[in-house]
Amino acid sequence: MRWFIDNMFGYWILLLVISCGISAICYEVFLRHLMK
Amino acid sequence: MFDFTVAGHVIPLFLLVLTGFTVGIVGGFFGVGGGYMVTPALIVFGFPGYMASGTDACHIAGKAVISSIRHRQLGNIDWTIALAMVGGTMLGVELGVRLLVYTKNIGLSSVVLLAASVLVMFGLFLYTQIETIKSSKKIAEETAAGRTIGRELKVSTIPKLFQAISILPIIKARTARLVISMWVIVIVGVLTGILAGFLGVGGGFIRVPALVYVVGTTSHLAVGTDLVEIVVSGGYGALRQSMEGNVDFMAVFFMIIGAMLGAQFGSLATSFVRGPAIRYILSYSLILATTGALLRLIYVLTGGTVEFLAFFAVVFTLGEMIFLCLFIVSLVLFSVRHKHGKWVPPWVPPLVVKD
């Protein structure tokens, strides 16, 4: 876990995973039924 | 959840506010209007292409006014350059809007806008990657030589070539401390204006690098001066897009609510973070936005039958926005900690301003 903070690349990966996770949830909950 | 109907397509309201908020932070922070991500993002969320472009242009004009006021207070605007560029920008916007109307009439606005966005953003990604590598080398050299790293780093000699052009009238920009032919500035205005009018963007993502690497201003002056230009290109673009029926004003209203909050924070953030750090973030956000737009483009071209393409387009596009917000907020927090002499990760100090 420390690597994700001490390394900029690791920090980006951490933020990216969090961001894409939130986006995936948003798609499933709010957008999926509207796209059909 | 409140949903919103735009040209027959339903969009969740919070996405409009979140999109406005994100580009508000990014716009105030980078000086770019954030439009390069809004138009493809709105198409990814379900807007028709021409409505995405028109709505984006309107929301940007409002947001740029707020950001400009903040940057004027910080002394980040060169009014001589800004006023010299206005005419060229308006001409460019007019040409760009006419091009958009043509693609709308032949029913290809979404496809053409997505394709153009992918090309522009990927080009910018490559460009900013190269510049980031140059800046990193410069920081390493300055640190090795024991010199203090200032707020701004000069890594290019290209502006000297353009400043040597002696076609009259020559203008003297006092705030930027440079002398340059007005035609260089006007041509930058026309070219960025065409992109602004067509994509519905402010054009800052091209204009800021152009001001830095062609005209020769500092990053922070480029950011402020560009925002004045976005008020003009966004305002004129919004007027023309409205006349063409490309704008949904309720969508604009909700996006501006988010943008108002984001722009104030973004402008303040520029006082905490160095120019090269700005390019770092911009560079990596571009590749996410490009991937999202590309997936949506393939989704549209395949007739909307492959659902996972729409899923990943949303994940990358929305993910990019959330990523940018989180990174900028965390960098400002790290900067504050650094100022107070507290522990920060080892990669943070070269990116933030301590004094």
Image (spheres, coloured by chain):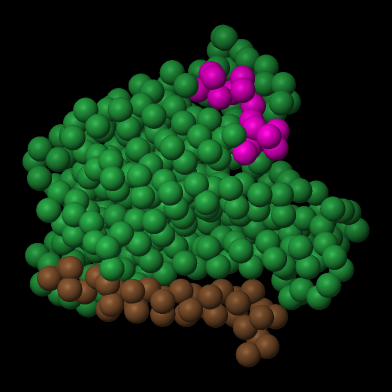
Chain colours: A brown, B green
State whether residue A20 is above or below residue B276: below
Residue drawn at x 41%, y 41% is B60
Picture residue at 83% right of the left edge, 62% below the top? B339
Whether residue B322 is in magenta: the answer is: no
Residue B104 on image: x %, y %: 14, 40
* Left or right of residue B289: residue B97: left
Q: Is residue B5 left or right of residue B184?
A: left
Q: Foreground: B207 or B125?
A: B207
Q: Say which of B166 and B19 sits in front.
A: B19
* Visible residue check, residue B184: no
Read off the magenta span: B70-85
Which image quarter holds the N terminus of chain B? bottom left
Along the viewing direction, whichever of B50 and B72 lies nearer the viewer: B72
Regarding residue B308, the answer to whether it shows in the image is yes
B190 versus B172 height, above or below: below
Asked where in the image residue B163 lies, by quadrant, the reply is top right
x, y (%) of residue B59? 38, 42
Magenta segment main secondary structure: helix
- Which residue is found at the position 64% from the left and 32% from the top? B72
